[in-house]
Amino acid sequence: MRVLMLSWEYPPVVVGGLGRHVHALATHLVGLGHEVVVLCRHEAGTDAQTHPTSDTVHEGVRVVRVAEDPTHLTFEKDLVAWTLAMGHGLIRAGLGLGSWRPDVVHAHDWLVTHPAIALADFHAVPLVATIHATEAGRHSGWLSQPLNQQIHSVEWWLANRADALITCSASMRAEVAHLFEVTDTAVIHNGISPRGWRPSAATVRAARERHSPDGAPVVVYFGRLEWEKGVQDLLAALPRVRRAFPGTRLVVAGQGRQASALVAQSRKLRVRRSVDFAGHLPDRALVALLAAADVVVLPSRYEPFGIVALEAAAAGAPLVASTAGGLAELVVDGVTGLSVTPGDVEGIAEAVRKVLTDPPAAARRARAAKSRLTAEFNWQGIAEQTAEVYRTAEIRDHPTLGRPKIATGNAFTV
């Protein structure tokens, strides 16, 4: 099949797990014999002079990376206008692919809704959409601000206009069904390629010496620094862990809007010298850090899937994770890791203490987690499942849609 994918992330422009997902899916679809064209963008803040539109083939995938228009719009301050401008660029690029025509259009998340619908309509082909997260989920059900409501309405439009829907977990399927009043959603998990997560012994030793030269326990968080990721709860748990295991260090690897607030919180808790805010780490450095960790903690308050849990397992790291969303499906408490209730600071501290108290048991759970990857989360199988969605997708009758109602209270309790 000829597949046209649209994504606002595609390596090396990666903000979170979505970019890695689209890249892995595209390359494995090519491996199955399909033709894949990805429409994506250059990094924010560039323009057509510094980063002109490019059309290249990488790993068998034709990647059309669209230049930003001259307008002075920024992602941080003008999100909706910036997204619409990006959409215009993607549409123009999608209409300029020469004689190539898709059999299906696949949209990844709300930011590409407008161009995906326009191109699916133009080519008269089915529109498949993967909902990776929701605005209501990111804000614990509250849609109180105009921007929240605008994003929610675009998500609702995409979900109701798509001819086939995909979510990455059963919990996300339930969330999407409740928020957008849709059914018949396919659940296809994210995946991982474990071979890319095997660092050398030397790099692991170097990471250990860098972050714990005195041999004290090393706790690691990696991912975006956003409120819904729960890093604030892990920081709050750190003093309790250090009382039981003096000298314990926390490494926070990632970037996000909460970075400065987390630094301030660490100072308020008087643990600033025990926390390394490492920022974004290159893949090799991240893998070495995870392999060197005594425990990786993923304290999310909202997590549609949790690909970071698979990455920690691939690196062989003992894992503590909340039961938020997809993490509850990925981590089997007491078997492949330890589970805690989202937002439970004492629960996080107790789980970390349990890992540090019994390293052999933690290592057994880590091995069990790693053994699941090949059987349950391999990209080959995920690509095959996605291709089956493409093959069975049919253009539905699409009634004219009005604006969705916005919950005045919590969207999850309405």
Image: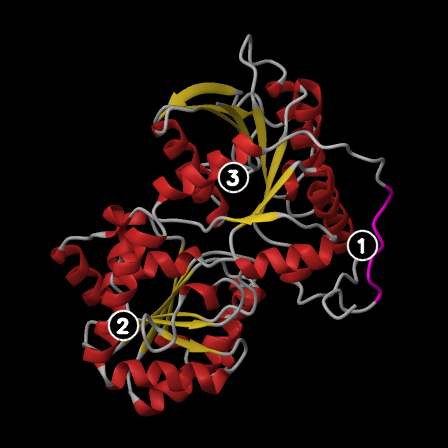
| Pointer 1 local density, CA inside 10 Å: few below 14, some 14–19, many at least 20 | few
Q: Is residue 404 magenta?
A: yes
Provide the residue designation for mark 3: 9
Compare residues 218 and 359 and report the one nearer the observer.
Answer: 359
Q: Is residue 105 magenta?
A: no
In front of the other: label 2 or label 1? 2
In the image: residue 304, left or right of residue 249: right
Residue type indicated by callout 3: Glu
Q: Residue 388: horizontal and vertical position, in percent?
A: 49, 36
Give the secondary structure at mark 2.
helix
The prevailing secondary structure element of the residues shown in magenta is loop
Q: Is residue 380 above or below residue 355?
A: above
Residue type indicated by callout 2: Arg
Compare residues 252 and 99 and report the one nearer the observer.
Answer: 99
Residue type indicated by callout 1: Pro
Provide the residue designation for mark 1: 146
| Pointer 2 local density, CA inside 10 Å: few below 14, some 14–19, many at least 20 | many
* Image point (84%, 65%), residue name: 408
Task: Give residue 365's mark.
Answer: 2
Q: Residue 312: horizontal and vertical position, in percent?
A: 33, 61
Distance between the alpha carbons at the discs numbered 1 and 3: 24 Å
Q: Which of the 4 image quadrants contains residue 114?
A: top right
Whether the residues at callouts 2 and 1 have beta carbons within 8 Å, the answer is no
| Pointer 3 local density, CA inside 10 Å: few below 14, some 14–19, many at least 20 | many
The residue segment tinted magenta is 402-408
Q: Residue 133: horizontal and vertical position, in percent?
A: 59, 53
* Image point (47%, 68%), residue name: 328
Q: Earlier in the sequence, mark 2 or mark 1?
A: 1
